[in-house]
Image (cartoon, rainbow, N blue to C red):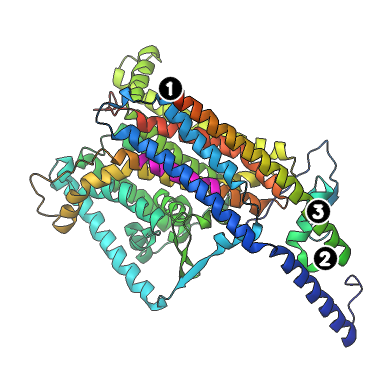
């Protein structure tokens, strides 16, 4: 009947409408079948998930609470790692029990709009950016003229305890505040700009290159210990950023090429506070990760993997195992270079690039396997895009695990530096985090992965019409996530060391 | 929302294409499920019946999958119980 050509007879139209209403009612009933029963079942499942998870975390805390060195754990390290991996696997199995599309959509579209006057945005942004500019100028000036003790230096405290540790934590746990602070954007906004069109084919690749370069500079140069070096790096970064923003226009530059803006935007996708079409909304944490808008290009995938890899890498080289690996590699590879330090820099760089390639390759391979094993006609590229955003929850978990201790110990010094930047204390207060902080690290790695598992489950349901295919498509990604978890839990369990050759 | 891109491998011929959006599907079940989820408003009675039938068939398979997942969880649980009993 509905396939008949359009008719202008009112009776027929009425009949059509009625039949349509009847049908949609039937389908609505069908979707709502045993809703309460399902919700009850879901409660039970999540109860089990949480109990299982809390058990594992408690075990994790038990492992690390002891005052003895971690090498003499009561539980062998492989068992601790296997338990971490199994937690992820088990939660993926449990997530596969949730097959109610309506419920998944409900969780991921739940939102409460906050009433914020639109007129506030402008003043708030400009005050924030003003603070940003003052901080930038002070950072450069005090880097050269201020105290050279790292823990008393305004430049180092703001850069590492502030932008490297605290702001990403704010971005993924509350909301992305970077656009309201970005001093370079504020400077570029008042200058004439937009002389060239940003090449669309480049997408976010400049940002990928830039974030990898920033991390490389952080490892190789003493930016975190010598304020003058850091101030020079900030000057260089500012020059490139402002030049780029003037050339291509601030909007496209900070959207695509600026590593900090892209990083904060992506971390912000995990947070519960989102701003859409000028309206501030509260959502469930991580519910935005199902959204196909977050990742739209291969370069976005490359950026997200870069975030995971840089945290893994900088964690690894500051452990005894990392130091031994570097020393061994420098010892056995001569590369025709006599100078040990140059050789070490080469080894650090190669390890950084190769490891990144392995991480990216593993992820891309997973998307190909996912496509092949499910026999779908959806391209591996599209699958890779859909499953990349959930990895941001993993990156957030790693970041928290690696930086919350640093932030906690430097926070009094940071507060002092921000209150009185021009009269730094001679002996800044540095806290030493209690031993249970290591448990916080393990817990945040696991929470990040659990959130990622759930987001991947929801993303699969978004992509595939068949629920069976949606479940099966996740297996390769779950394997990759287990791999990432085991590696990062291993790094967290190793004793710390100073990276060799880089004094 | 970015587009979902599809390609058909060279040595395969798609079972059918969705008449509303043109996406190819390897099996007719998946096509029926796709139409029911994405083009619900446009379906006629027959297609709707097919969709409901495919849904309930899928639900049966999901039940089997859940049982398997439960089995895997039980194995995992007891496996780790044993490991902890021996090594910890």
Q: Which residue is mark 3?
A: B54
Q: Is residue A303 left or right of residue A318?
A: right
Q: How many numbered marks have been drawn onto this rendered protein structure?
A: 3
The subunit letter for the residue under badge 1 reads B
Outermost bottom residue? A10
Q: Is residue A484 left or right of residue B52?
A: left
Q: Which residue is mark 1?
A: B87
Q: CA distance from mark 1 to mark 3?
A: 48 Å
Q: Are marks 1 and 2 on the same chain?
A: yes
Question: Considering the image in quadrants, where does the C terminus of chain A appear?
Answer: top left
Q: Closer to us: mark 1 or mark 3?
A: 1
Q: Looking at this view, is A203 or A246 the one in front?
A: A203
Q: Closer to us: mark 2 or mark 3?
A: 3
Q: Looking at this view, is A97 or B16 the one in front?
A: A97
Q: Earlier in the sequence, mark 1 or mark 3?
A: 3
Kindly state the secondary structure of the residue where label 3 is placed: helix
Q: Is residue A5 left or right of residue B1?
A: right
Give the residues in magenta. A441-454
Residue B58 in sight here? yes
Q: Residues within 10 Å of mark 1 (few under 14, many from 20)?
A: few
Kindly state the secondary structure of the residue where label 1 is placed: helix
Q: Is residue A131 above or below residue A81?
A: below
Question: Considering the image in quadrants, where does the N terminus of chain A appear?
Answer: bottom right
Where residue A500 appears, as percent x and y from the top left, is 28, 24
Q: Is residue A436 magenta?
A: no
Residue B43's disc is 2
């Amino acid at each position: 009947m509905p396939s008949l050509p359009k008719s202008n007879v009112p009776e027929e139209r009425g009949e059509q409408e009625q039949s349509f209403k009847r049908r949609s009612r039937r389908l609505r009933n069908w979707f709502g079948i045993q809703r309460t029963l399902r919700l009850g079942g879901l409660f039970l499942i999540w109860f089990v998930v949480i109990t299982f998870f809390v058990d594992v975390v408690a075990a994790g805390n038990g492992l690390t609470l002891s005052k003895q060195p971690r090498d003499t754990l009561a539980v062998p390290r492989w068992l601790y790692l296997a338990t971490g991996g199994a937690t992820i696997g088990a939660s993926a199995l449990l997530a596969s029990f949730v097959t109610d599309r309506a419920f998944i959509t409900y969780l991921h579209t739940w939102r409460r709009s906050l009433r914020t006057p639109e007129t506030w945005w402008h003043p708030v942004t400009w005050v924030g950016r003003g603070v940003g500019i003052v901080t930038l100028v002070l950072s450069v000036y005090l880097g050269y003229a201020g105290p050279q003790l790292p823990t008393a230096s305004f430049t180092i405290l703001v850069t590492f305890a502030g932008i490297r540790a605290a702001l990403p934590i704010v971005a993924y746990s509350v909301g992305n505040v970077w656009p309201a602070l970005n001093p370079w954007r504020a400077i570029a906004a008042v200058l004439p700009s937009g002389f060239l069109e940003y090449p669309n084919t480049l997408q976010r690749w400049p940002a990928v290159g830039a974030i990898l370069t920033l991390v490389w500079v952080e490892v190789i140069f003493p930016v975190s210990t010598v304020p003058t070096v850091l101030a020079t790096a900030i000057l260089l970064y500012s020059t490139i950023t402002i030049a780029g923003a003037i050339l291509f226009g601030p909007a496209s530059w900070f959207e695509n090429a600026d590593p900090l803006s892209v990083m904060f935007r992506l971390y912000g996708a995990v947070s519960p506070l989102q701003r859409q079409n000028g309206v501030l909304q509260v959502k469930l944490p991580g519910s935005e990760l199902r959204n196909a808008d977050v990742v739209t290009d291969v370069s976005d995938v490359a950026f997200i993997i870069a975030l995971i890899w840089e945290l893994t890498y900088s964690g690894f080289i500051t452990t005894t195992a990392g130091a031994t690996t570097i020393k061994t590699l420098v010892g056995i590879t001569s590369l025709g270079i006599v100078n040990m330090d140059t050789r070490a820099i080469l080894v650090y760089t190669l390890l950084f690039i190769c490891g990144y390639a392995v991480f990216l390759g593993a992820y891309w391979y997973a998307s190909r396997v996912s496509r092949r094993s499910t026999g779908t006609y959806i391209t591996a590229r599209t699958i890779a895009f859909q499953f990349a955003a959930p990895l941001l929850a993993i990156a957030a978990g790693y970041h928290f695990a690696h930086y919350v201790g640093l932030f906690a110990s430097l926070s009094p010094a940071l507060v002092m530096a921000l209150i009185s930047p021009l009269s730094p204390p001679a002996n800044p207060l540095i806290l030493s985090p209690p031993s249970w902080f290591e448990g916080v690290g393990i817990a945040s790695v696991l929470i990040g992965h659990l959130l990622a598992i759930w987001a991947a489950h929801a993303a699969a349901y978004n992509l595939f019409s068949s629920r069976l295919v949606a479940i099966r498509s996740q297996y390769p990604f779950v394997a990759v996530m287990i791999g990432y978890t085991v590696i990062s839990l291993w790094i967290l369990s190793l004793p710390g060391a100073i990276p060799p050759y880089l004094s | 929302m970015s587009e979902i891109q599809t390609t058909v491998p060279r040595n395969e011929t798609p079972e059918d294409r969705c008449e509303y959006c043109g996406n190819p599907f390897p099996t007719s079940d998946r096509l029926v499920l796709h139409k029911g989820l994405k083009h619900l408003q446009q379906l006629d009675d027959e297609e709707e019946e097919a969709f409901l039938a495919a849904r309930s068939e899928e639900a049966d398979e999901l039940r089997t999958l859940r049982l398997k997942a439960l089995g895997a969880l039980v194995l995992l649980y007891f496996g780790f119980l044993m490991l902890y009993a021996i090594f910890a």
